[in-house]
């Protein structure tokens, strides 16, 4: 197979489809997305059966439990996937929205309006629900999408993509508006991210190794985050019972997620009172603790954290713990070792909270809430294209608005510049 020509075909077809999508009305695109959700439900059994085969192969191959968890499409996750697509259909469409109107002294009328990005490529691992999330978001905003999932989820992704395409086409969607690359050769990714003139942006969702490989090879813009080293800082005035509850959710609710907590920072003034509670919680929850010297002195028997632990995205039930000397050291630790993803403070002091919110340089900063909320669905976006820790164009969960750019419309009456 000529992989270069094969992948270029995806780009050529997607570009043509994006131009057809752009002239569809908002009402037509809503109907398309609604039909996508309906067809997912209609093909539930086929999708679940395909996913079960993928999961069985992954387990037989010895895939890490965290990755198997990401791959598994439970009934709850299937329903959440369908609900996400339905929510996207109901959300306000940003395309065509007038962002600014200007009337110049010479009579020129200028408008700044939102427009689709065009063609979006997304490269992702494990999570098959991503196929439905991104397809619905892209079609809603009149963008064509090329999906390339991991080989471990190929059957699941193909089944979901087939349902989405069938539903969308039944309501007038261009057939090539949603395409899934069906070969697992790594060369396909390299070719995809070099389709200048055909693909407008690429979004990698997966482990740090995948993201760095995309960035190193891409000739088109990339929106991404490398990894999620997220922190929970328990400040001196925190409600300690609530702190344990929030910590449990941030670490244990889904430890394989990029917004799960990886490091706990505890104010020195409450360390001797709070850390024993953390130790009891960890034992009950099955969480392995790795602490600095002060933590180990209070909780003898836990592993000592190394310098590498502060930068580690465990994606499992492991938590590094450090005692800090107040908010200054907590903020410094987060800005030094964090990945600008999601970080939280638990505190009863509004002035301390505000300092933390202002000075922690992350895409999502929380006060008295779990980091697990960094998600397009939880932010009211219905679904998300991914999470960006970049500072240009998009930051944090990316939904409908982040899949648009803008252009200027200038109206004159034979105006010329003097």
Image (spheres, rainbow, N blue to C red):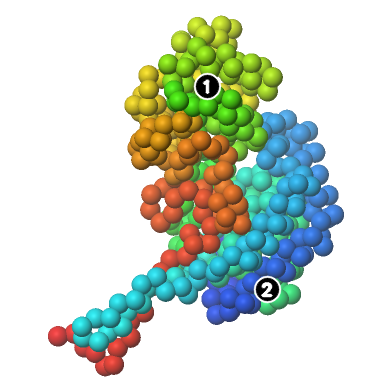
Q: Position of residue 398 (x, y in %)?
A: 51, 54
Q: Is residue 88 above or below residue 367?
A: below
> Badge 2 local density, few (<14 within 10 Å), some, or many (20+)?
some
Q: Decide if residue 70 is on the left or right side of residue 278.
A: right
Depth order, front residue of 232/216: 232
Q: Secondary structure at mark 1?
A: strand
| Residue occupied by mark 2 | 31
Query: In the picture, which quadrant includes the C terminus?
Result: bottom left
Q: Residue at x 74, y 37 (%)?
A: 58
In this view, the residue farthest toward the left is 418
Q: Is residue 274 visible?
A: yes
Q: Position of residue 148 (x, y in %)?
A: 62, 53
- Residue 13 lies in what quarter of the image? bottom right
Depth order, front residue of 7/177: 177
Query: In the picture, which quadrant includes the N terminus?
Result: bottom right
Q: Where residue 76 is drawn, which disc sits there?
A: none
| Residue occupied by mark 1 | 320
Query: Mark 1 near mark 2, Cβ–Cβ under 8 Å?
Result: no
Depth order, front residue of 282/204: 282
Q: Residue at x 66, y 44 (%)?
A: 126
Q: Position of residue 33 (x, y in %)?
A: 67, 67
- Residue 7 lies in what quarter of the image? bottom right
Q: Is residue 247 visible?
A: no
Depth order, front residue of 340/238: 238
Q: Decide if residue 418 is on the left or right side of residue 32.
A: left
Q: Decide if residue 225 is on the left or right side of residue 178.
A: left
Q: Decide if residue 87 is on the left or right side of residue 59.
A: left
């Amino acid at each position: 197979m000529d992989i270069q020509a094969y992948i270029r075909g995806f780009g050529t077809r997607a570009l043509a489809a994006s131009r057809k999508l752009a002239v569809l009305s908002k009402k037509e695109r809503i109907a398309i997305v609604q039909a996508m959700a309906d067809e997912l439900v209609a093909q539930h059994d086929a999708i679940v059966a395909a996913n079960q085969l993928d999961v069985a192969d992954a387990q037989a191959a010895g895939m890490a439990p965290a990755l198997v968890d990401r791959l598994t499409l439970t009934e709850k996750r299937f329903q959440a996937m369908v609900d996400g697509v339905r929510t996207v259909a109901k959300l306000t469409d940003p395309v065509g929205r007038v962002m600014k109107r200007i009337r110049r002294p010479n009579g020129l009328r200028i408008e700044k309006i939102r427009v689709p990005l065009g063609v979006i490529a997304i490269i992702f691992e494990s999570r098959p629900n991503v196929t439905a999330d991104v397809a619905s978001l892209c079609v809603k905003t009149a963008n064509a999408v090329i999906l390339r999932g991991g080989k471990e989820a190929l059957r699941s992704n193909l089944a979901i993509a087939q349902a989405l395409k069938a539903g969308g086409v039944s309501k007038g969607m261009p057939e090539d508006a949603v395409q899934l690359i069906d070969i697992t050769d790594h060369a396909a990714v390299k070719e995809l991210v070099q389709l200048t003139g055909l693909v407008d942006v690429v979004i990698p969702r997966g482990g740090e190794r995948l993201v760095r490989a995309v960035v190193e090879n891409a000739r088109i813009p990339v929106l991404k985050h490398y990894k999620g080293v997220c922190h929970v800082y328990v400040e001196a005035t925190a409600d300690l019972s609530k702190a344990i509850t929030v910590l449990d959710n941030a670490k244990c609710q889904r430890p394989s997620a990029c917004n799960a907590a990886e490091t706990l920072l505890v104010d020195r003034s409450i360390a001797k009172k709070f850390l024993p509670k953390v130790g009891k919680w960890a034992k009950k929850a099955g969480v392995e603790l790795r602490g600095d010297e002060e933590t180990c002195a209070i909780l003898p028997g836990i592993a000592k954290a190394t310098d590498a632990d502060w930068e580690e995205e465990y994606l499992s039930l492991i938590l590094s713990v450090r005692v800090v000397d107040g908010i200054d050291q907590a903020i410094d630790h987060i800005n030094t070792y964090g990945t600008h993803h999601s970080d939280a403070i638990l505190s009863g002091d509004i002035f301390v909270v505000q300092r933390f919110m202002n000075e922690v340089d992350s895409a999502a900063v929380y006060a008295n809430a779990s980091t697990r909320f960094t998600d397009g669905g939880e932010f009211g976006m219905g679904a998300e294209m991914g999470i960006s820790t970049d500072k240009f164009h998009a930051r944090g969960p990316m939904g409908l608005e982040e899949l648009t750019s803008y252009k200027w419309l200038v109206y004159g009456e034979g105006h010329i510049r003097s």
